[in-house]
Structure formats: C-alpha cells, structure tokens
Image (cartoon, rainbow, N blue to C red):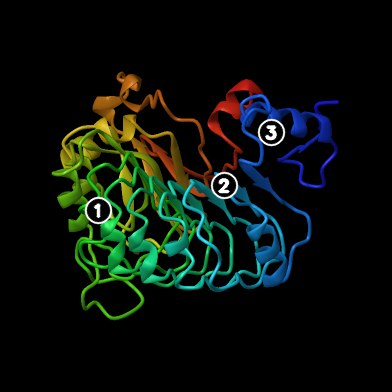
C-alpha cells in the first residue's frame, strides 16, 4: 500500500493515499490549506497550463512542477511573495527561464532546475538574496552568471555532471555560507591549477584558486565534490582546512601521466592521507591510468588505506601492484557499502 510498481527500478511511486496524507501533514494537518501546489508528472507541456496553475496558487509557499514536459515558462507571472520552494527538475524540454520569473518570488529559498535542457541561467538569479539551495546538475548550462555571487545566503550549490561549465571569477569564492559545493563529474572551462586545460576562452574564468579563496571565507566546514585531472589538483585540495573533499572523480580524460595512489607517495605529495580518509565516493573511470600500489615499507600498515567514510566505489580497469606482481582488473560496484553487504569483497 505504501508504494506502487514503477518502471524505474531505482525509485518507487507513492500510493495516492500516502501522498495525500503527506500533503495534509505538511499543511499543518489541514490548517494551512493551499500552501502546496503539487503537479508533478501530470503531463504539463504548455506555458498557459503553467500560468493557470500559478494564478490559482495565491498564497502558496511550495510549488512542484517536476517531471513534466514543460518547454517554456510564461512571462509576467503574478507575484508570489510567500513562495519559498520551486521544483522544476526533470523537465527534459525546458530550455529557457524568463528573466522576470525570479523577480516575482523574492522570498525563494529552494530552487531545483536539475536535469532540464536549460542552457543559460538568467542574471536575474541575483535578486534571490534569500536563496539557500540551488541545483543545476545535469543541465547543459554553459556558464554561470557573475550575479551568482549575490546569493550570500546560499548553503547548497549542486553543479554535478555538467559537460563543460564556465564559472566566472568571484562566482563562488564569496559564498561564505556554503556547506556543500558539488562539482562531481563536471568538466570546467579553465578550472585547473595550471589553467592549461579547458574548452574555451580563459578570460575572466575561474581557476581552482577560487576554492582557495572560498576556503579562507567559509564560516563552517564545506563539503566538496570535484573532478580532478592530476596530482597538482589533489595537492591543492589536500591543503584546504575548511573545505572537505567528499566526492572525488578521476575521469577517463585524465592526463597521460599516471596518478599513483600509494601510501608513501600520497604522504609525500599530499602531506597526509587526511583528504582521502574523508571521501564518501571515489570514482575512477575506465580509461584513467591510476596505479594502486603497496610499497614494501607499507605492507604491514594496511590501516593507512582504510577509508572509513567511503560509501561508493565505482572502478574502471586498474593496475594493482604488489611487489613484482602486476595485474589489471575491471571492478564495478554500485557502492562500497552494497558490495560489503553482499559479501562481494
């Protein structure tokens, strides 16, 4: 009764009765009616359909239009000064946000535009000065506007799995309240220590120095997800005291020089294993040349390689060396925790 069959094996569909109960509880047991507008997965396509729903939602605090087929949002919508949550994720055809949209929701704290077809984020995003959560993951967005720096209350910025993203100088370094910056699986235009990589013009583009500046400003520990292309990037990340790397991706486009992950080399190059020990997800993609090696002096110190917080370990073909024995293997696990539970390791 709690759930119904769903084509997606990784999700469940909530039973209508349970859904209605959840909405009733969220509306203070019915005392705050019409505070939620939930039209998720109902086949909305036209801007006029969205406008009609919006007009009828006066006083609403949360709107979910996720998982529809919306192609365009209407312009000049009525102001919704009480609106705090707007969820538009998984509208695969949504390519454009009207510039005036954000101006009609000045109290917004939560905005999800992930897995849409959005290619540009309007500069008017800067008016959402109360925004605490912004998710653009999986969208084909090309660049972030410099007005992102105006979002001083932002705590969660999710930018994972974006093909090629340009981050302007100062775009994130002044977001001192950030608790999570997720760049996992995202390739950047000029987002390297040496600024020798990237897919476009370097002018006014950010580098990893942006993280160093953010590290000096954040008010509390900030969790980071990131894709790296070399040891120098790892060295910089390991030097950050207030930014903790939780999700680390070593992609197939890694440099020809191998990244050697051995206790002694890591200690020598990074100073310590502290950064690796904080990882919750470590992804090494199939074409990356990463050598996992146990040095003679480390053979009796297996504790060095224990990663106590690791939850996911997707691995491609690796070279594992011990003494004179070298063997290439292909390991693919849904997660380290699941592998352990299934007694696969």
Q: In this view, does 318 lie above or below 344?
A: below
Q: Residue 233 carries which label?
A: 1
Q: Name the residue under label 3.
A: 23
Residue 311 in sight from this viewpoint: yes
Upstream in sequence: badge 2 or badge 3: 3
Q: Is residue 52 above or below residue 181?
A: below
Residue drawn at x 61%, y 38% as measured from the top left: 334
Check the picture and name the quadrant holding the N terminus. top right
Upstream in sequence: badge 3 or badge 1: 3
In the rendered structure, the answer to whether residue 71 lies left or right of residue 135 reads right
In the rendered structure, the answer to whether residue 135 lies left or right of residue 265 reads right
Q: In which quarter of the image is residue 171?
A: bottom left
Q: Is residue 11 above or below residue 152?
A: above
Check the picture and name the quadrant holding the C terminus. top right
- Residue 133 image position (x, y, % from top left): 42, 46
- Residue 224 image position (x, y, % from top left): 34, 43
Cα separation, mark 2 vs mark 1, equals 48 Å
Q: In this view, does 147 lie above or below 177?
A: below
Q: Is mark 2 on a helix, strand or loop?
A: loop
Residue drawn at x 50%, y 73% as measured from the top left: 98
Residue drawn at x 31%, y 61% as measured from the top left: 148
Q: Residue 59 carries which label?
A: 2
Give 195 or 293, whichever is nearer the viewer.
195
Cα separation, mark 3 vs mark 1, equals 46 Å
- Residue 210 image position (x, y, % from top left): 20, 57
Q: Are marks 2 and 1 in contact (CB under 8 Å)?
A: no
Q: Residues within 10 Å of mark 2 (few under 14, many from 20)?
A: some
- Residue 107 image position (x, y, % from top left): 42, 49
Q: Residue furthest bottom?
A: 201
């Amino acid at each position: 009764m709690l759930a119904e069959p769903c084509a997606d094996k990784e999700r469940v569909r909530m039973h209508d009765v349970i859904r209605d109960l959840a909405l009733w509880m969220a509306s203070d047991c019915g005392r705050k009616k019409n505070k939620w507008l939930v039209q998720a997965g109902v086949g909305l396509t036209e801007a006029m359909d969205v406008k009609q729903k919006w007009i009828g939602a006066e006083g609403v605090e949360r709107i979910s239009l996720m998982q529809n087929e919306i192609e365009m949002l209407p312009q000049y919508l009525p102001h919704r000064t009480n609106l705090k949550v707007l969820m538009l994720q998984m509208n695969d055809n949504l390519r454009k946000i009207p510039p005036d949209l954000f101006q009609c929701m000045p109290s917004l704290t939560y905005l999800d535009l992930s897995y849409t077809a959005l290619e540009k984020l309007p500069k008017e995003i800067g008016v959402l000065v109360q925004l605490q959560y912004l998710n653009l993951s999986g969208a084909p967005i090309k660049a972030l506007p410099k007005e992102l720096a105006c979002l001083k209350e932002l705590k969660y910025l999710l930018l994972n799995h974006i093909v090629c993203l340009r981050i302007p100088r100062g775009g994130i370094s002044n977001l001192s309240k950030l608790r999570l910056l997720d760049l996992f699986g995202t390739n950047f235009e000029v987002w390297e220590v040496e600024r020798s990589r990237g897919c476009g013009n370097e002018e006014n583009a950010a580098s990893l120095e942006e993280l160093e500046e953010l590290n000096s400003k954040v008010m509390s520990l900030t969790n980071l997800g990131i894709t790296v292309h070399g040891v120098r990037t790892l060295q910089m990340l390991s030097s950050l005291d207030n930014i903790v790397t939780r999700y680390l991706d070593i992609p197939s486009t890694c440099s020809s020089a191998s990244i050697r992950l051995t206790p002694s080399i890591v200690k020598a190059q990074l100073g310590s294993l502290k950064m690796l020990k904080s990882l919750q997800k470590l992804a090494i993609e199939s074409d990356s040349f990463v050598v996992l090696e146990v040095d003679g002096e480390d053979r009796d110190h297996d504790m060095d390689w224990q990663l106590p917080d690791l939850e996911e370990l997707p691995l491609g073909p690796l070279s594992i060396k011990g003494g004179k024995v070298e063997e290439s293997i292909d390991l693919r696990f849904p997660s380290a925790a699941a592998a352990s539970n299934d007694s696969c390791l």
